[in-house]
Image (cartoon, grey):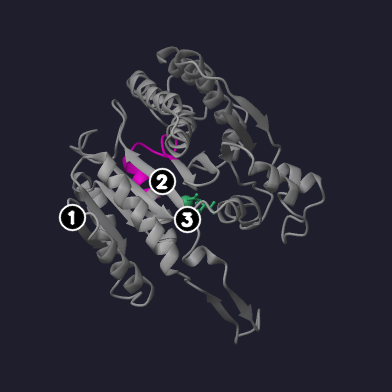
Amino acid sequence: MRIAVLGGDGTGPEVVAEGLKVLKAVAQKVGFTYETKEFSLSGDRYLAAGGDPKVQNIPVIHDHEVAELRTFDAIYLGAIGHPKVAPGILEKGLLLRLRFELDQYINLRPVKLYPGVWTPLKDKGPDEIDFIVVRENTEGLYSGMGGVQFKGTPHEVATQVLCDTRMGVERAIRYAFEVCRKRNRKKRLTLVGKTNVLTFAHGLWYRTFMEIGEEYPEIEKDYNHVDACCMWFVKNPEYYDTIVTDNMFGDIITDLGAMIQGGMGVAAGGNLNPQGVSMFEPIGGSAPKYTGMNVINPIAAISAMGMLLRETGNHQSNAKWIQAGDLVELAVTATTPKMKSQAAGKMGFSTTEVGDLVAAAI
Ligand code: IPM
Ligand code: MN
């Protein structure tokens, strides 16, 4: 397995190092070899190369680097975001660019409460909080279409186009039905949208969902408006099995999901192109204030490594990689009960010690 490693900004490199530690342990255990190559892509590099902190003037990632990334089996990303660089430059210049150009059309985000992890939801435990969100990852409000006119005047006009296509919606929905079928839990797929307001775009989602759903008679086809979904996440998270939703709503509800599963230190995600190169990341940010202190929680990054192994194994039909991914997940499950908290600086262990615990559990 060849893995491109993008530590990125802030605490990204620290958590990625722990994921690689666990990779080493699990590769030995299961018996496969791998190679990693580090790419120094970050806000610091952008600034050092003469990047303007306010408006993007040079590439954050070069064309030849994107081309090289296409040759790997998977990409492992730490975090992107720099306090001195204006919002949007690194996000659009690196993260969104890779999602779009590598056509990583699924963002897979499990919301799973591990044993011993505190949740702010009273009377809910690991049995109640265990669902998965399939977020469409290349369209919707993230399409980048729109613009401003008469900027800075009282007549300023701003448009931001929600662009959905039948092809994009259909492939996300189909992927979600397959995830739901494999999970074998409640056999319920919930489409989350806003069909009462976004009548055009989410009308397309709803019609496509019902149509594709006919191919999956054993799966319950369920629909929630996004606002109601936020309510149920808090009140009845056990209701959910698999959720499919558009890019923007998927972004928002998975932060809420991250909180009920114990915080940003725990939540992992995969940007998937099942036919191409996928990218895995902890979904929390670069946490600049904790950089270099050995206090940030690496569990999310380690789980992301588990997803990297399992999903890349699934896409390439490699049983050892799948087994390795499952082992990482088990090792995380064995480690979280030993930790005092999942919050940075309160874990009862340092970043590197948590990585050691998971590697030992392997
Ligand atoms: C995420 C992040 C990104 C997103 C940002 C950094 C562009 O919030 O991965 O959820 O909105 O998709
Ligand atoms: Mn987000």
The residue type indicated by label 2 comes to: Leu
Residue at mark 1: 217
Front residue of this view, candidates 272 and 335: 272
Find the residue positioned furthest to the right: 50
Quadrant of the rendering where the C terminus is positioned? top left
Gap between marks 3 and 1, in whole Å? 26 Å
Which label number is shown at residue 108?
2
Vertical placement of residue 209 versus 71, above or below? below
For marks 1 and 2, the one nearer the N-term is: 2
Residue at mark 3: 137
* 278 part of magenta stretch: no
Q: Are marks 2 and 3 in contact (CB under 8 Å)?
A: no
Vertical placement of residue 243 versus 193, above or below? above
- The verdict on label 3 being within 8 Å of ligand 1 is yes
Q: Residues within 10 Å of mark 3 (few under 14, many from 20)?
A: many
The residue type indicated by label 1 comes to: Pro
* 259 part of magenta stretch: yes
Local SS, label 1: loop
Local SS, label 2: strand
The residue that appears at 44% across and 19% down in the rendered structure is: 358
For marks 2 and 3, the one nearer the N-term is: 2
Q: Residues within 10 Å of mark 2 (few under 14, many from 20)?
A: many
Gap between marks 2 and 3, in whole Å? 9 Å
Gap between marks 1 and 2, in whole Å? 23 Å
Image coordinates of residue 211 in percent, x first then y, are: 27, 66
For marks 3 and 1, the one nearer the N-term is: 3
Front tag of 1 and 2: 1
Image coordinates of residue 185 in percent, x first then y, are: 20, 40
Viewer can see residue 141: yes
